[in-house]
Image (spheres, rainbow, N blue to C red):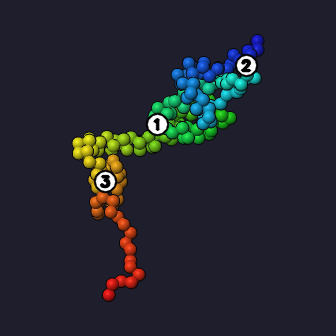
């Protein structure tokens, strides 16, 4: 079997961009963040293994569903020998991310439900607005931002 030169197994950043649909600047960003890696030629040009295509697809799919890059990097770091993610890896990781995504969906639903009220009144009141003051624990007891610590005078009036 003839030996295939290593250079045929590699892609330039332009080729990787064209094949993956990611902008060259995004690929450079992914590399800076440790999501993908390249080797440098003697002319200091980046060369990516063809397996990087799947890795970029994995990163972009995770980003599309709202997974932060730091979380994606942690997931990729868990793969043995920094190998390319498989369908099984994606299934396992996406199941692990399900709770986080469900919470984001809940928050977006809450935002959607209260956005019309906000646009309707236009006040953005700290007293009642769940957008500018979410999960307000004290709003049930008092209005606005008037919660102050109680100061005790060292010499009470007689």
Q: Left or right of 153: which side holds 128?
A: left
Question: In screen coordinates, is 154 left or right of 30?
Answer: left
Task: Say whether disc 1 or disc 2 marks the residue closer to the N-terminus.
Answer: 2
Residue behind mark 2: 6
User: SS for tag 1?
Assistant: loop
Which residue, given by chain and number where applicable, does mark 3 sit on?
Answer: 126
Q: Which mark is residue 5?
A: none
The answer to whether residue 117 of the structure is visible from this angle is no
Q: Is 86 placed above or below 15 here?
A: below
What SS does tag 2 mark?
A: helix
Relative to residue 6, is residue 104 depicted above or below?
below
Residue 109 x %, y %: 34, 41
- The answer to which quarter of the image holds residue 144 is bottom left
Q: Residues within 10 Å of mark 3 (few under 14, many from 20)?
A: some
- Furthest-top residue in this view: 2
Query: What residue do we see at 23% from left, 42% from top?
Result: 120
Of the residues under marks 2 and 3, which one precedes in the sequence? 2
The image position of residue 122, as x and y in percent, is: 25, 45
Residue at point 34%, 49% (across, down)? 132
Quadrant of the image containing the C terminus: bottom left
Q: Residue furthest left?
A: 120
Q: Quadrant of the N terminus?
A: top right
- Looking at the rendered structure, the secondary structure element under dot 3 is loop
Q: Earlier in the sequence, mark 3 or mark 1?
A: 1
Res 71 → quadrant: top right
Q: Position of residue 101 (x, y in %)?
A: 44, 40
Numbered badge on residue 66: 1
Label 1 Cα neighbours within 10 Å, binned few <14 / some 14-19 / many ≥20: few
**Mark 2, mark 3: which one is toward the viewer?**
3
Residue found 45% across the figure and 34% down from its top? 65
Where's residue 31, x and y in %? 62, 32
């Amino acid at each position: 079997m003839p030996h295939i030169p290593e250079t045929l197994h590699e892609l330039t950043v332009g080729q990787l961009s064209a094949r993956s649909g990611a902008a060259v600047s995004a690929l450079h960003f992914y590399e800076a963040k440790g999501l993908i890696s390249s080797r440098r030629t003697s002319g200091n040009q980046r060369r990516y293994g063809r397996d990087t295509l799947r890795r970029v697809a994995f990163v972009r799919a995770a980003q599309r569903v709202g997974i932060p890059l730091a979380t994606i990097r942690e997931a990729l770091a868990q793969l043995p020998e920094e190998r390319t993610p498989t369908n099984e890896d994606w299934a396992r990781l996406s199941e692990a991310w399900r709770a986080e995504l469900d919470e984001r969906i809940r928050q977006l639903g809450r935002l959607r439900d209260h956005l019309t009220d906000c646009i309707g009144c236009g006040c953005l009141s700290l007293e009642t607005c769940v957008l500018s003051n979410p999960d307000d624990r004290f709003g049930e007891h008092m209005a606005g931002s008037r919660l102050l610590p109680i100061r005790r005078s060292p010499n009470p009036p007689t």
